[in-house]
Image (tube, rainbow, N blue to C red):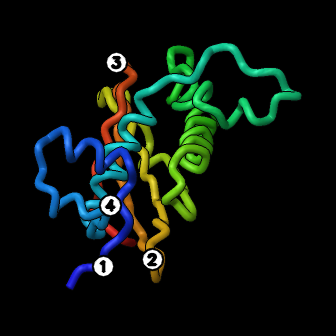
Amino acid sequence: MPKKLAAPVLDAILGSQRGIGREALSHSMTIFQIKESLRRNLINLFNTRQCPVSPPLQSRFLTESLLNYGLPDLMSVNLGSTAEARQLSEAIETAVKNYEPRVATVCASINGRPDPLEPEFYFRIEIVLKVALANELIIFDSTLNPITHNFDVLETNDHE
């Protein structure tokens, strides 16, 4: 029998809007459902841009508020630069740590070297998910389209 976990409020609301029956919204989810929910939330997080004006340094709570939800603006990021690609990886990690409470640990890395002929950049995001009795490792392969600045996030079964 699959492990059951508490359903996030958003998933319960979305389920009721989609007409899912009451028994399906029993406020418990399988690991598969949690992973899919996390994947959807990561897509939303990565495709949202933070407010371009940083909050004052003395307002430490604002840096983790919805004001800074998402990633920094990517228009000026040169992902061909190893240093800037590393900064984006760090921004991904920070955003996940700040806005996804189901995650115990996160590690984002560039997956391979950028190919000048390939219009997308690949990132690997390794997440340890907090679950009821144990932690669950999930690996997402993510692509960033440098033209549209949109991310796509897919779960991989590759647990190296």
- Neighbor class of circle 4 (other Cα within 10 Å; few <14, some 14-19, many 20+) is many
What's the amino acid at mark 1? Lys
Q: Residue 117 placed where, x, y %?
A: 30, 27
The residue beneath circle 4 is 34
Label 3 – label 4 distance at C-alpha:
28 Å
SS at circle 1: loop
Say whether disc 3 or disc 1 marks the residue closer to the N-terminus.
1
SS at circle 3: loop
- Whether the residues at callouts 1 and 2 have beta carbons within 8 Å, the answer is yes
Compared to residue 23, the image places residue 43 above or below, namely above
What's the amino acid at mark 3? Thr
Label 3 – label 1 distance at C-alpha:
38 Å
SS at circle 2: loop
Q: Nearer the viewer, mark 3 or mark 1?
A: 1
In this rendering, position of residue 142 left or right of residue 53 = left
Say whether disc 4 or disc 2 marks the residue closer to the N-terminus.
4
Say whether disc 3 or disc 2 marks the residue closer to the N-terminus.
2
Say whether disc 1 or disc 2 marks the residue closer to the N-terminus.
1
Of 63 and 46, nearer the camera is: 63
The C terminus appears in which quarter of the rendering? bottom left
Q: Is residue 157 visible?
A: no
Give me the disc on residue 3: 1
Say whether disc 3 or disc 4 marks the residue closer to the N-terminus.
4
Label 1 – label 4 distance at C-alpha:
11 Å
SS at circle 4: helix
- Whether the residues at callouts 3 and 4 have beta carbons within 8 Å, the answer is no
In percent of the image, x 61 and y 25: which residue is there? 67
Q: Nearer the viewer, mark 3 or mark 4?
A: 4
